[in-house]
Amino acid sequence: MRRSLTLSILSLSFFMVALSAKAQNQSYDTKHYNLKKGLAIQGYDPVAYFTENKAVEGDEKISVKINGVTYYFSSEANKQLFVKSPSKYEPEYGGYCAYAMATGDKVRIDPETFKIVDNKLYLFYNFRFTNTLKSWNKDESNLLPKAEREWGKIIGGK
């Protein structure tokens, strides 16, 4: 009886730790994500960037919430592709401007200003006569590793 009780307590403790870790991962996702009211990419369809090579506004009726982040899609097919492999379609750097990330800055983006590099979605600031995608394209080979390094610092990794 005592052994059974001990095993039950250990099992419950393990379960609680696992739930806590999952909750921490969820708060990590939203803490470091460029969101407005929990919405990613200002409501644009993350899959369309890859399948149509253009920014397409999503429909709030076709949405999914993963780790506290809501995504809109332009079609049910795109939603299903995303659900199968979210990390394949999520924007890099939490949806912040890739160019600004090279200096460790979290800067808003224009969802229609983007680039796909090595099957990864990068978004850029494009307001007030400043299109950071143009600057990025001039020095991408140097900016990309800097942005990766700075993002690692932000999320507490590398």
Image (cartoon, rainbow, N blue to C red):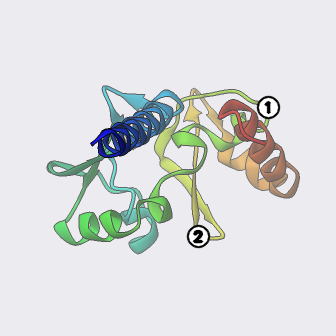
In the rendered image, the quadrant that contains the C terminus is top right
What amino acid type is highlighted by mark number 2? Asn
Residue at image mark 1: 103
Percent of width and height locating residue 128: 57, 26
Q: Quadrant of residue 2?
A: top left
Percent of width and height locating residue 103: 79, 31
Q: Residue at x 57, y 37 (%)?
A: 96
- Foreground of the two, 109 or 148: 148
Q: Residue at x 61, y 38 (%)?
A: 97
Percent of width and height locating residue 136: 75, 48
Q: Residue at x 61, y 43 (%)?
A: 93
Disc 2 element: loop
Residue at image mark 2: 119
- Is residue 45 found left or right of 24 in the rendered image? left
What amino acid type is highlighted by mark number 1? Thr
Above/below status of 104 relative to 143: above
In the rendered image, the quadrant that contains the N terminus is top left
Looking at the image, the residue that sits furthest to the front is 1
- Foreground of the two, 7 or 147: 7
